[in-house]
Image (spheres, rainbow, N blue to C red):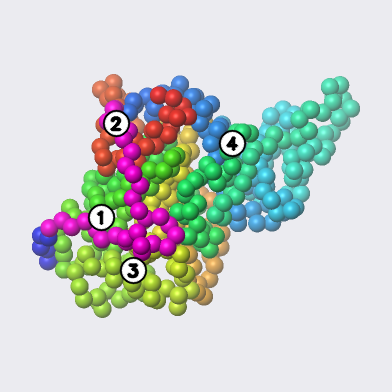
Amino acid sequence: MNLRKVPFMPVERIKPTDFTRTPATPAAKPDFGSATIPKERYTSAEYMRLEWERMWTKVWLLGCRMDDIPNPGDYHVTSIGKEEIILVRQKDMSVRGFFNVCLHRGNRIMVGEGNATSFKCQYHFWEYGLDGAFENIPDLETFPQGAPPCKGLREVKCDTWNSFVWFSMNPEAEPLLDYLAPLPEHLEPYHFERMVKVADMTVEWDCNWKTSVDAFNESYHVQGIHPELLYFIEDKDVQIDCYGRHNRYLVPFSTISHRVEETTEIPHLIKHAMKEAGMNPADFDGRVTEVRKALQAFKRKHGPAMGLDYSDLNDDQLTDDYHYNIFPNLTLNTHADDLMLFRQRPHPSDPNKMFFDVFIFKLLKKDEPRPKKPRHEQFKHGEKSLGLVLDQDAYNLPGVQAGMNSDSFDGLWIGDQELRIRHFHHVLESYVGS
């Protein structure tokens, strides 16, 4: 490669007058101090218990996609910690959620997903309607106390937004849109409902769920474990914004990091992005650092002919990663043509383990056949590849968790590039305490 040094220049971004709907103006920088974040939040069984009592059972959580349960009677069972929740489409097309627990002897009732006219426990055939109400209790006359007074399955709050189904185990939970604010304004322009799911995986990782959240809440680590990405993204000059519970950073893609020398040859990852958009790299006559804006202009001009509607997105969104954390456990790598959604779930009993869900959604081009719904795959770390970048993260995280359990380590020493981690812990403290 022909390399030459260039002075560092901040990545050119859209100006406030350029954007359409998704806010792009930087938010005011909060001051969360510089104190060490205690390691016990990642290693302590007692802190894990407090998280469950004070946070997981109080917040809104992602359950499934609306098109996972498109028809009346379609159900999907999701789990969080020790609980399982049945999400079911009602006859009037609304969605309701119930704890997946039979009121007789506590048996799990449903598994996975499917279609049902009722929910029947296979232990003693206690049966519940799609609305959760008792439909049949065999030999009810042999119960001198009668049927349980609750009338049926215990319900959880349930709502939908942006093609996803959400639930909360907190009967007093605020409305979903209030909880998500201000992100509906940020994310609705992407029209997730137009995207189709192309991957659905769950991996058991040997780390705390927050260890995983942290890994995707900062780009400081790119120079360490993702060196090949330095020829595709700017990893330091990123915009970090904190909003109430949630946060984001805006990462320029299809460019090169200021950490590397500029090259006259377009790196292969940038070439791939150009080809995916229908742009021939051989036709580009300019500096590598000029590709990003040229690619944005190309997609703006040629996208409609390919059936790709970018009209609600600003130019930077056509190339960049608008990367969001929805508290507590959702990571959204949001792009014009796809969404990589990560869900971090706690292990039921071990603070040193977690479940990492990967959902990938794709915006289809005109005449592109709709793929079959992907089969859900579940495996342990190392049994199957998640792709180079995620494999690099997955390989690193057990070592992070092991180190945090060392007597020599007191806690996280956080810098400005990791502001999102400080913000996350600020919100966590508001639920769990410090």
CB of mark 4 within 8 Å of CB of mark 2? no
Q: Earlier in the sequence, mark 2 or mark 1?
A: 2
Q: Which circle marks residue 173 in the picture?
A: 4
Identify the residue at image location x=47%, y=29%: 431
- Mark 4 or 1: in front is 4
Q: Earlier in the sequence, mark 1 or mark 3?
A: 1
Describe residue 159's horizontal placement relative to residue 364 as left or right: right
Q: Which amino acid lies under the numbered mark 3 shown in the image of this protein?
A: Gln
Instruction: Please state the extent of the stretch shown in magenta in the rendering.
Output: 7-36
Q: Which residue is tagged 1?
A: 234
Identify the residue at image location x=10%, y=63%: 4
Seen from the viewer's position, the closer of residues 207 and 266 is 266
List x then y, in percent, for residue 304.
45, 75
Q: Is residue 219 magenta?
A: no
State whether the magenta stretch is mostly helix, strand or loop: loop
Identify the residue at image location x=87%, y=25%: 142
* Above or below, 167 relative to 47: below
Q: Which residue is tagged 2?
A: 33
Q: Which amino acid lies under the numbered mark 4 shown in the image of this protein?
A: Ala
- Mark 2 or 1: in front is 2
